[in-house]
Every structure is written in C-alpha cells, then in structure tokens.
Image: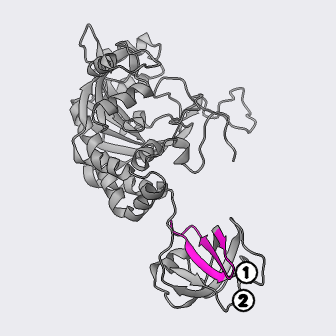
Amino acid sequence: MFLSTHGLTGIRYYCKNTSTKVRISEALSGASLGADVTVQGWVRSVRSQKENLFFHVNDGSSLQSLQVIASSNLNSTLPTYGSAVEVRGILKKSPHPKQPFELEAKEIEIVGECNPVEHGFVQIHTPVITSNDCEGAGELFQVESTCPQDSEDHNFFSVPAYLTVSGQLHLEVISGAFSRVYTFGPTFRAENSQSRRHLAEFYMVEAEMSFTQSVEDLTKVMEDMFRSVTELVLTQCAEDVDLFHKHVTPGHRENVEAMLKKKFTIISYSDAIDILKRSSEDFVFPTDWGCDLQTEHEKYLVKHCGNLPVFVTDYPYDLKPFYARDNQDHPQHTAAAVDLLVPGVGELCGGSLREERLDLLMARLEAAGLKDTYSWYLDLRRFGSVPHGGFGMGFERYLQCLLGIDNIKDVIPFPRFSHSCLL
C-alpha cells in the first residue's frame, strides 16, 4: 500500500486529531483501499526526486511502513528522518520495501502460551525481591529503601534483600503442590561483563517438575519447548521472521529449520572434554576435566555436532550449585546437571535434578556455611519431598538463536549492563 498526496495540501506536522485517521496497520490491511485517509507517525526514510517526494511513515502499529508519494513542491517544511508527521491522501495498492524489526513482545506472548498448553504447566509469579542467592555466585543487586528508617535496623525487610537471580527456589516450594510449574519474568545478575551474551537484567523462562528422576526427562521437556515455541513463532510471525532473515541475517532461516529437523544430540561433560582435547583449535581457556566450559568451548562443541543444538550432561559436582543432585559416581564425582548449547550463542538453557536426599543436601550446605540460611530449604526435604528437577532458558539468548543476532544487546529495547543504565 502507498498513500498518494497529489492535489492535496501536503504534509502537516503531527498536532491535530482527525476523524478520518487510520493506523498504519489498518492502511496496510487494504480495508481502506481507495479511500481518503489520514495517517500519523514518524518518518523512517526520505527520497526526493525532481517532481515527487517519497518517504515511509510508521506509527508502531506494524512492522512495515507505509510509503507516501507527495509532490516535491510542498507548502510546508520537507520532512526529515524521525519527523512526526500527519499525512492525508488516497490509499492505493503497491509493493513497498520491508524493514527489520523486533519480535520480543510477540514471542513473550507465544512463550507464555506454549508451555502451559503443550506440557500442562501452571504459571507462578515468583518474587522479584528475594532474600536468597539461588546461584550462590554472589552476583547480586541489593535492595535498599531510600526512606529514613525509625529503627536502628536499616533493612526494610529486616533481612538483606536482593533482586532475584532466579525464581527456581520459589518454584521448588510450589512444585510440592502443583507437579509442573513455571515462571517467566525478569532476573538480575551483577556480573561485571561487557560480553556479547551477558546482561545485568534479562528475562528467563524457568520450569520445575516433580516426579522427575532422570536428566533425560529434563532434556525431553527442554527440547520440546524449544521446538514448540520456535514452530509457533515461525507460524504466527512468519512475515516478521522472513523480513528479518532477509534483510538482517540472510541465510539464517535455513539454520533455524535445520535445528527443527533432527533430534538434539546428547553428550556427557566427559565426552565434551575429550572432543575439545582432540580438536586442533587453539583455545584461550584450558580444557582439562573439571574446568567450566567457556563460550569458545560451547560454540566448538555445537559446530562439532553438526552445528545443531547439543545437550551436555553430568558436569563436575564442584561446578554446580548446592541444589544439584549428586550422582555419587566417584572418583569423577559429577552432578545430574545439563546445559543446552545452540549455534551462535552457546549455552541457552541450564538445568539439573535437585538434591532431594536430606542428608546429602545438609552436608553440602554445611560445607558451604549455608545451613542456617537455607534451613527452610532443608525443611522441604525434611517433611517430605519427591525427586524433582528443572531448568531455565534465557529469553534474549533465545531471540539471538532464532534471529541470528550476534550481540545480546541488540535484542532488548533497553539493555542493562555494567556502566550502562541511561534511562
């Protein structure tokens, strides 16, 4: 569709309401084809010729912009990129250029709908403010009130409080009543990183499942979720995805489709270390057994496995948080944990079986000096528990994987990272 303004008064800067106004999305639908309409929006591009002026207007209601053709002899100031304009003219049909876009809002809706429908999960709104450090890494943002306190205790909640790094522990509580639960919300990490895959504030989809007794149970749900969400996005946002893959990341659509055609590979951490050691790559970080896998290792493993998603299971016990289930497989000593690695990103999902055995969990918390802090967590086992497990998926990393975006800061409107919080 395009809007012809020939014979009209020209372009007016956005300042008045009009009863004939239509949104860009409505204009592009063709419902008002041939009608005299008014649109309001922002100029996205301008091209001037001898007799005609061509520019594109977008009001945020559509990922596409409406092309406007006007006389170059206007009775008002020529529009420039970013100008807010009101244009009146005759709506006509014509192909027009597509533009790249951001899929975040639609995909949040799809992820929220897909998990409960496909797997019977109950959504839980876990708190953003918490008193625990789920990951145990100490990368926390502490919450403090700016109001003066009457008492000597300056903690608003009477205990130190932080922005959540994960809703997992709260999900574990609720999974004692509902066997399958999930949350989808913001999480925060005070990690001083400027890398292309880290943010201080990001979204996570986290799930917890009772009566889960094997890592394979987790990998099945993780793979099914990835496939279900991706297939829905490709179906419900087909035009958007096609536009992006065409103009921003040409050829990436084939990579996405390839990920959906084959079962994901599953290898153990020990197998992964063997693969890395046999490679001819000159890695920056060591690849000895017991070392944590770095991004360069993860990307190589994905490439080694056909540039397709790969699960890595049974990590060294000491690399994982206190809640990961002990495999009791000495002398190696591993935990029943799993990461999903995907092309272009590396780690997308991380999960584990949870340690449900009271004696083993208590021993590990005692060794870490956390027994008193997590006494409530021990009570979940002390008064009856079942084998359970769960995982978390970084939503922005999923967008990177789907769209082929190299930098995570390009898939979120307001990226937060160290030394950057502009507004």
Query: Crowdedness of circle 2 by 10 Å Cα count: few (<14), some, many (20+)?
Result: some
Instruction: Tell me where residue 354 appears, x and y as whole percent.
Output: 31, 27
| Secondary structure category for the residue under label 2 | loop
Residue 99 picture location, percent across and down: 52, 63
Circle 1 SS class: strand
Residue 315 highlighted magenta (yes or no):
no
| C-alpha separation, residue under disc 2 versus residue under disc 1 | 9 Å
Amino acid identity at mark 1: Arg
Residue situated furthest front in the rendering: 50
Mark identifier at residue 9:
2
The one of 230 and 316 positioned closer to us in this rendering: 230
Measured along the vertical axis of the image, is residue 3 above or below residue 133?
A: below
Q: Tell me if mark 1 has few (under 14), some (14-19) or many (20+) residues whose alpha carbon lies within 10 angstroms of its own.
A: some
Is residue 152 left or right of 241 when viewed as pictured?
right
Q: Which mark is residue 12?
A: 1
Main SS of residues in magenta: strand
Residue 22: x and y in percent read: 56, 81
Instruction: Name above or below for residue 7 compared with residue 221.
Output: below
Residue shown at the point (26%, 20%) measured from the top left: 271
Q: Residue furthest top?
A: 331
Residue 64 seen from this side: yes
Give the magenta range. Answer: 46-70
Instruction: Examine the image and state in which quarter residue 70 appears.
Output: bottom right
367 over 219 or under it: above or below: above
Q: Is residue 383 above or below residue 31?
A: above
**Measuring 44% from the left and 23% from the top, which residue is drawn there?**
374
